[in-house]
Image: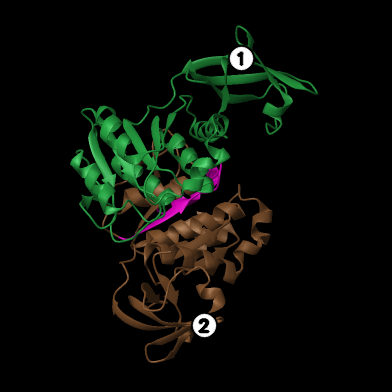
Chain colours: A green, B brown
């Protein structure tokens, strides 16, 4: 953790912050020490610990800087299996993606949609880990789209707008573009990839197929490799 | 798994392969089906299942193609904690890195060196998962370097040779170069980063410091992001 993310509720009064045991149990610090903090969806700065009690800790907080810029990227990710979903959410959040649609696809196992990992609290926990890792404060939005066709046909055109739309599909299209500057929407399939019908539907809706070369990567690896290639 | 990796021992005679239960328990296929296979450190091709018994499976194998090209990259990775090590080895193997040094660094916890994950068999298992994911056959070499200073001073100059030497260090140096063509050696620190003394020693030995921007990424995320940026 490179930043402790605070919410408005943590502020007692002015710049005084009080955290209960649960929140600071992994912070090994003494009175007088300072640590990097951020206000959820707000500025970043420093906190100085002024007292440590059995059940709570108090610090004074000075917020003075902006979090790192967000990527102008929306990710449409076919819902991965729960363990991989957790890590993908952490990676996406750490990399600065602010809009994530978890969508259905033929090769998404139906049971994945029942996973407790999809609860609002659990999604938020993973996103927060990513923010605290990357010293960011701006919580990404995550939307669940359980039906592929209506999502692509009815919702995606407005989501894409004037952005560049890309679908990662091994073995087709062009090599993933490097260091683009414009906003983009990137669709990433499940393990095993989108089925041809799905790729066709995305292409019909203006998505360009792109790939990362001859190697087939796991979703988790591909997500990071694609984003790192697209935006410096 | 996108390829089943076979060893010379799996071949009974000519192109006939026999696999025991353990190896094919996750292959859900019938007689007559074919699947992509590769020979360890050799060619890739197809296997056609000719019989399935209670304890073993037989297939005929035609090897005809070359595995995807390797990256001209050597990675010096500060030993991560065991769970992250496993995933890093899978990622590195899938991405096509063939020479990996797991090295010590001030912020590597001593206990990590005692982990059973570092046994030859366990390392090989993770590397194989990466190869089978990426349809590769060439097993990376993994070397353990438990002492930082002698490694950097005595061994690294010969490892680097005429390659470009880079050390990933957030907040210093230049932005990670894109799509380089020449061989390179990339040093990646532990969670929390290399300490200044270590970065200085690497720089003294010809390493350029590079970064991925304002965001501090987990080692696992950074490994993939760096490699994807360096080589298309």
Mark 1 chain: A
Q: Which numbered marker is on residue A9?
A: 1
Residue under the point 33% across and 76% down: B46
**Label 2: element kind:** loop
Residue B185: name its quadrant: bottom left
The secondary element bearing badge 1 is classed as helix
* Range drawn in magenta: B183-206
Q: Estimate how packed mark 1 is, as few (under 14), some (14 to 19) or many (20 or more) residues with alpha carbons within 10 Å.
A: few
Q: Is residue A17 left or right of residue A170?
A: right
The local crowd at label 2, few if under 14, some if 14 to 19, many if 20 or more residues have their Cα within 10 Å, is few
Give me the residue at 54% from left, 45% from top: B197
Report the quarter where the N terminus of chain B lies.
bottom left
> Which residue sits furthest top?
A14
Q: Which residue lies most toward the bottom here?
A: B13
Identify the image quadrant of residue B148: bottom right
Marks counted in the figure total 2
Residue B208 appearing in the image: no
Residue for point 23% across, 27% down: A161
Residue B146, x across and y down, in percent:
60, 61
Host chain of mark 2: B
Q: Which residue is mark 2?
A: B53
Q: Nearer the viewer, mark 2 or mark 1?
A: 2
């Amino acid at each position: 953790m490179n930043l402790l993310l605070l919410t408005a509720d943590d502020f007692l009064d002015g710049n005084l912050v009080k955290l209960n045991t649960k929140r600071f149990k992994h912070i090994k610090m003494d009175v007088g020490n300072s640590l990097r903090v951020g206000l959820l969806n707000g500025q970043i700065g420093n906190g100085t610990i002024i007292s440590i009690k059995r059940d709570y800790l108090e610090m004074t907080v000075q917020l003075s800087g902006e979090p790192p810029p967000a990527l102008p990227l929306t990710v449409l990710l076919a819902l991965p299996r729960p363990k991989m979903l957790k890590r993908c959410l952490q990676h996406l959040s750490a990399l600065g993606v602010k809009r994530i649609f978890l969508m259905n696809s033929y090769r998404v196992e139906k049971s994945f949609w029942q996973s407790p990992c999809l609860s609002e609290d659990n999604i938020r926990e993973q996103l927060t880990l990513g923010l605290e890792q990357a010293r960011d404060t701006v919580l990404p939005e995550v939307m669940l789209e359980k039906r592929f066709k209506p999502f692509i046909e009815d919702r995606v055109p407005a989501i894409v707008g004037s952005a560049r739309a890309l679908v990662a599909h091994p073995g087709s299209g062009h090599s993933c573009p490097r260091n683009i500057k414009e906003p983009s929407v990137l669709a990433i399939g499940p393990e095993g990839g989108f089925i041809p019908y799905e790729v066709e539907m995305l292409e019909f809706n203006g998505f360009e197929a792109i790939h990362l070369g001859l190697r087939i990567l796991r979703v988790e690896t591909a997500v990071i490799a694609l984003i790192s290639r697209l935006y410096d």
